[in-house]
Image (cartoon, rainbow, N blue to C red):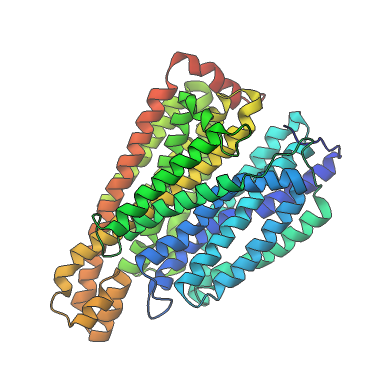
């Protein structure tokens, strides 16, 4: 199924692309800007006093709804027009941003973030469809590359904008920055962007949407619950995990039997498609976890301001942008297996380098590790995405792209769920001896996180307790980093094994070449 071609001239094409890029920056800003505010949101004195589990849900609900709503958004665009669905997504994103900014408790923030993920999911596939209909074949790849480059801009801007806003206003202001972007983008969409529809429309898949959302939510709930003072053996942990796996298995079976699936599991019969997507999921698993604990390390344990934290993350964002182009050029010459597989091993090694981060580690070393890690991440993402799509027949590339986007978001959901839980449970175990002599009420108040412990330490005038919280957090961060590193290293080995076979070279070079 293809979108009807729209014949518009070159200046109009440029205006359409400018609007779509501007709207896409919104999605990428929001994937990183919240991290800067997490320290304040967790602090009972300056924020909501959110527990680690609530913070995990605030991050994870966005990725969860984003992942599961992508296919429904594409089908709605086919039926009602992609501009219409894109505009609706922008409006939902803006309204949810207002809700998140003034959320009175963690539950409200989590729900608002999930709604923002839904709005973001309505924007991505519709933008791709509009580009496909607006640009002729010879200019389409370049337009997609420009649109994709918006991710680097948004990832870099998010921490910087968040740092300025959190330092000068309150944590909720990081969401209000979305409103002018939404307003300008919405006006541009309605005035400039055409409204293509499919000649033959896909049917919506409400059962698939329900099963995928429920399964992933149950799995994430069980993993996050394990870190909330319950342990891994309680039924509140293993029952949701097993239930989530069962529902996802049912979802796979339903989609497999469907004549027109929204998520086509049959694509995974291709070994390279499976390996590439699993490697990307492993990468995003580690990235999300590292961003989560990195903000608490810099702002909480080291006492840096929000803006200083944003600046410390900037080398990593620059590295991702630089690594994308470098990786594409090198992969064309040496193959995806060696370049992206090797780069993912470097990412794993950079996670292991987090073991050198302590309370007095030179900030320059943190930035150097971030830069190297960012370059390696960029060298993984761009070539691997291109390669996994290249192994599919032409008429399945659209479905493969949608699956690829979803798998990356699922990796993010599982990363924040599992790595966040390891961080929280390890911290709780390590801080327990320091809290043993406190009165029961103070011990309960100090236990959930390092932010809660520091708040109690301030009330009791116990600087030694605050120091113990910092030490316990750094230890928990190290253990979490090792887990992320092992997953990334496994993904790198998988890429090396899957993409170093002789017959993969032709496909890789075809898709990575400028004319391919």
Q: Position of residue 348 (x, y in %)?
A: 34, 40
Q: Nearer the viewer, residue 342 or 24?
A: 24
Q: Nearer the viewer, residue 199 or 120?
A: 199
Q: Position of residue 225 (x, y in %)?
A: 33, 60
Q: Nearer the viewer, residue 424 or 310?
A: 424
Tell me the quarter of the image containing the N terminus: top right
- Note whether 451 is above or below 290 in the view shown: below
Q: Residue at x 56, y 38 (%)?
A: 263
- Note whether 504 is above or below 385 in the view shown: above
Q: Residue at x 59, y 56 (%)?
A: 118
Q: Position of residue 99 (x, y in %)?
A: 58, 72
- Examine the rendering and report whether any part of residue 139 can be seen: yes
Q: Disc count in the image?
A: 0
Is residue 24 rendered to the left or right of residue 114?
A: right
Q: Position of residue 285 (x, y in %)?
A: 41, 46
Q: Residue at x 47, y 22 (%)?
A: 334
Is residue 270 rendered to the left or right of residue 478?
A: right
Tell me the quarter of the image containing the C terminus: top right
Q: Quadrant of residue 440?
A: bottom left
Is residue 400 rendered to the left or right of residue 475?
A: right
Q: Residue at x 35, y 48 (%)?
A: 242
């Amino acid at each position: 199924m293809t979108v009807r071609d729209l014949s518009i001239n070159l200046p109009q094409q440029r205006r359409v692309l400018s609007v779509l890029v501007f709207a896409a920056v919104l999605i990428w800003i929001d994937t990183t800007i919240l991290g800067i505010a997490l320290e304040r949101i967790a602090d009972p004195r300056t924020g909501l006093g959110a527990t680690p589990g609530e913070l995990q849900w605030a991050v994870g609900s966005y990725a969860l709804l984003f992942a599961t709503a992508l296919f429904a958004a594409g089908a709605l665009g086919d039926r009602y027009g992609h501009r219409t669905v894109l505009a609706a997504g922008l409006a939902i994103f803006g309204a949810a941003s207002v809700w998140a900014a003034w959320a009175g408790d963690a539950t409200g923030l989590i729900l608002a973030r999930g709604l923002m993920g839904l709005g973001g999911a309505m924007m991505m596939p519709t933008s791709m469809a509009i580009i496909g209909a607006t640009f002729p074949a010879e200019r389409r790849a370049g337009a997609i590359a420009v649109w994709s480059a918006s991710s680097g801009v948004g990832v870099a801007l998010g921490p910087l904008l968040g740092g300025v806003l959190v330092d000068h206003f309150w944590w909720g202001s990081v969401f209000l920055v979305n409103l002018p972007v939404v307003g300008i983008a919405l006006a541009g969409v309605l005035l400039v962007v055409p409204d293509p529809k499919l000649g033959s429309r896909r049917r919506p898949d409400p059962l698939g949407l329900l099963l995928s959302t429920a399964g992933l939510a149950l799995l994430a709930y069980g993993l996050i619950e394990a870190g909330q003072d319950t342990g891994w053996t309680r039924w509140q942990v293993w029952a949701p995990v097993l239930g989530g796996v069962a529902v996802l298995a049912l979802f796979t079976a339903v989609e497999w039997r469907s004549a027109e699936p929204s998520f086509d599991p049959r694509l995974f019969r291709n070994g390279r498609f499976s390996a590439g997507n699993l490697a990307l999921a492993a990468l995003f698993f580690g990235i999300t976890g590292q961003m989560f604990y990195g903000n608490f390390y810099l702002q909480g344990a080291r006492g840096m301001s929000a803006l200083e934290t944003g600046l410390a993350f900037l080398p990593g964002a620059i590295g991702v942008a630089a690594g994308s182009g470098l990786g594409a050029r090198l992969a064309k010459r040496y193959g995806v297996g060696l370049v992206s597989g090797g780069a993912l091993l470097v990412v794993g090694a950079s996670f292991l380098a987090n073991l050198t981060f302590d309370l007095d580690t030179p900030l320059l070393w943190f930035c150097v590790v971030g830069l190297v890690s960012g370059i390696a991440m960029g060298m993984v993402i761009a070539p691997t995405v291109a390669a996994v799509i290249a192994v599919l027949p032409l008429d399945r590339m659209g479905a493969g792209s949608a699956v690829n986007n979803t798998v990356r978001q699922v990796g993010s959901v599982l990363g924040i769920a599992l790595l966040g839980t390891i961080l929280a449970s390890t911290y709780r175990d390590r801080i327990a001896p320091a809290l043993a002599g406190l009165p029961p009420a103070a011990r309960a108040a100090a236990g959930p996180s390092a932010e809660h412990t520091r708040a109690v330490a301030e009330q009791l005038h116990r600087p030694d307790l605050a120091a113990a919280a910092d030490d316990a957090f750094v230890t928990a961060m190290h253990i979490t980093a090792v887990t992320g590193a092992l997953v990334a290293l496994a993904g790198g080995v998988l890429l090396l094994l899957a993409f170093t076979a002789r017959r993969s070279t032709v496909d890789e070079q075809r898709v990575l070449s400028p004319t391919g």
